[in-house]
Image (cartoon, rainbow, N blue to C red):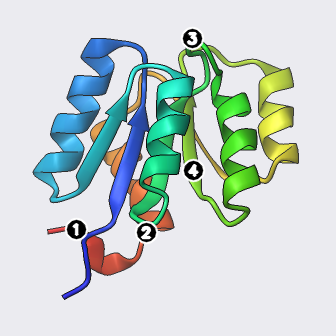
Amino acid sequence: MAEHPVILLAEDDDVVRELMQLVLESRGFHLLTARTGQEAFTLYCQNKNRVALVISDIDMPELNGIELFIKIRTVDPTFRGVFMSGRFDFEVAARLHELGVTHFLQKPFSPEEMLSAVRSLLPSNTER
């Protein structure tokens, strides 16, 4: 039996991270969580064979979401991610587009919006 794919969730706001974790775990997803970009990168490197998707805030301490994306891509050029932010910045949006990021969530977003982004990047048999 194949091991269930893992989502790495990187969010520095404890309340937002815990709510997202609750929603994702209630749908059967397995999660690793990080409070900073550097913690997320370390977790990714330690679990790269299990992590199927990263969901990351853009504005985080130590490494922001874009820096995290670039570092993970050096380890795994096929890495897929969903990025989110509470503020819209045309420069950030342009940079994400340049890097090939296809999924961005503007906070606040609904659980359905988040799940839709996750489902579009993961195989269909990963949810309960």
The C terminus, quarter of image:
bottom left
Marks 2 and 1, the one that precedes in the sequence: 2
Residue lying at 73% horizontally and 62% vertically, measured from the top left: 77
Q: In the visual, does 108 lie left or right of 27?
A: right
Can residue 62 be seen?
Answer: yes
Q: CA distance from mark 3 to mark 4?
A: 18 Å
Q: CA distance from mark 2 to mark 1?
A: 9 Å
Q: Which mark is residue 81?
A: 4
> Residue 70: percent from the left, percent from the top?
75, 41
> Residue 120: percent from the left, percent from the top?
48, 65
Q: Nearer the viewer, residue 39 or 70?
A: 39
Can residue 105 be seen?
Answer: no
Marks 1 and 3, the one that precedes in the sequence: 3
Name the residue carrying label 3: 61
Give the residue type at disc 4: Gly
> Residue 69: percent from the left, percent from the top?
68, 41
Q: Are marks 2 and 1 in contact (CB under 8 Å)?
A: yes
Q: CA distance from mark 4 to mark 1?
A: 17 Å
Residue lying at 34% horizontally and 78% vertically, measured from the top left: 124
Residue 40, relative to residue 80: is it above or below? above
Give the residue type at disc 2: Leu
For numbered disc 2, what is the local secondary structure? loop
Q: Which mark is residue 122?
A: 2
Q: Are marks 4 and 2 in contact (CB under 8 Å)?
A: no
Q: CA distance from mark 3 to mark 2?
A: 27 Å
Give the residue type at disc 3: Pro
For numbered disc 4, what is the local secondary structure? strand
Q: Nearer the viewer, mark 3 or mark 2?
A: 3
> Residue 122: percent from the left, percent from the top?
43, 68
Give the residue type at disc 1: Glu
Name the residue carrying label 1: 127
